[in-house]
Image (cartoon, rainbow, N blue to C red):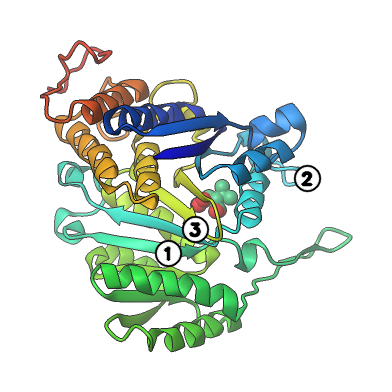
Amino acid sequence: MKLNIALLPGDGIGPEVITQAVKCLEAVEETFNHNFEFKEALVGAIAIDKTNNPLPDETLQVCHDADAILFGAIGDPKYDNNPKAKIRPEQGLLKLRKELGLFTNIRPVKIYKSLVNRSPLKEAIISGTDFTIYRELTGGIYFGEKKLSEDGTVASDLCEYSEMEISRIAHLAFKAAKNRRNKLTLVDKANVLESSRLWRKVVTNIGKSYPEVELDFLFVDNAAMQIILNPAQFDVILTENMFGDIISDEGSVIGGSIGLLPSASIGDGSALFEPIHGSYPQAKGKDIANPIASILSAAMLLEHFQLFEEAMAVRRAVDKALEKGIVTPDLNPKSTYGTHQVGDFIANNIVDEDDEINMNDENIDLGKSTII
Ligand code: IPM
Ligand code: MG
């Protein structure tokens, strides 16, 4: 298959993790005889530095022309603590989501057996956790009208949803539940918010077309608690933009590190794949960032194009790295493996899946490990 993939490495650790994901896609290309063309473009703080625009027109064009986009991370501390900054890196990502119509963000949360002891939660609580968050991505409070009074003392952000915006993602979430364990939980704040009451009404109606799917509702405060108390109860969680942002970070630590969680943003046309973690500026250039979320985002990209065997090869190689302890320090503080060594190991295992590639293999650029 020929695929044009736009690469938007962005800021902080973005470029490092994207490099590893590309390495893995190239391993897939070679092993399964595909043709992936990569085209890199600027986004985020680095784009502001170079063009004064977090999403230059040229980048948008590259994304429109591509079949899929692999996104790294954006954000820079120099903007975070400056409430007066008019141009912010995050605007680049938000505009990209809106312009490309990426209205559904899919964030799978699962547990790896080899990492149960890395979770902040007890093994008995996390065992069996396997859920997916369907987060609405182009509406709600993120995109509603923003106001700041002239004297700067009063501000507001409007949370608005239309029936159409709710129903298009709800159908995707119900379909996903049908292919999984037939359970859908709508997370909202319908006891307080009018917009949440509309979500309940629309989702309840759509639910009638999916009788095999059990639908339940949770207020977001309770959901935040339930995700920690009993994460295994969830199958598909459907929610609006900001609630999804918050509970997906919460869900990500159940597995032991936010550095493991990929995501797919889909919608009208092209699709975007990105780790859910941010730019982690403190780790930039130190070769300690976990590339797995980015590599698993590449696996989701492959699945999006029905390349299931290929995606499986990537996932198996990731599992192998985790089992053998070829991981970055976030997953094992004693590990001396760097970002690129984890990437090399995973890529090499995609190519030679049946060979026993281990830390002594000369193909892998090894550090002095104390792990195995
Ligand atoms: C995410 C991020 C973004 C969001 C930021 C960077 C704008 O936190 O993808 O979860 O809030 O959507
Ligand atoms: Mg977030």
Distance from Cα at disc 1 to Cα at disc 2: 30 Å
Q: Amino acid at mark 1?
A: Tyr
Q: Nearer the viewer, residue 247 or 236?
A: 236
Q: SS for tag 3?
A: helix
Q: Nearer the viewer, residue 227 or 207?
A: 207
Q: Quadrant of the C terminus?
A: top left
Q: In the displayed image of the protein, which residue is found farthest to the right? A: 150
Mark 1 Cβ inside 8 Å of ligand 1: no
Mark 2 Cβ inside 8 Å of ligand 1: no
Mark 3 Cβ inside 8 Å of ligand 2: yes
Which tag, 2 or 3, sits closer to the chain's start?
2
State the residue at coordinates (88%, 59%).
151
In this view, 223 is above or below 197: above
- Residue matched to label 3: 245
Whether residues under marks 1 and 2 lie with C-beta atoms below 8 angstroms apart, the answer is no
Question: What number is the disc on residue 86?
Answer: 2
State the residue at coordinates (39%, 43%).
297
Q: In front of the other: label 1 or label 2?
A: 1
Distance from Cα at disc 2 to Cα at disc 3: 23 Å
Q: SS for tag 1?
A: strand
Direction from residue 327 to residue 272 in the image, left or right: right
The image shows residue 73 at horizontal and vertical percentages of 52, 38
Q: Quadrant of residue 184?
A: bottom left
In this view, 357 is above or below 159: above
Q: Quadrant of the N terminus?
A: top left
Distance from Cα at disc 3 to Cα at disc 1: 10 Å
- Residue matched to label 1: 134
Q: Nearer the viewer, residue 199 or 271?
A: 271
Q: Amino acid at mark 2?
A: Lys
Which tag, 3 or 1, sits closer to the chain's start?
1
Q: Amino acid at mark 3?
A: Asp
Q: SS for tag 2?
A: loop
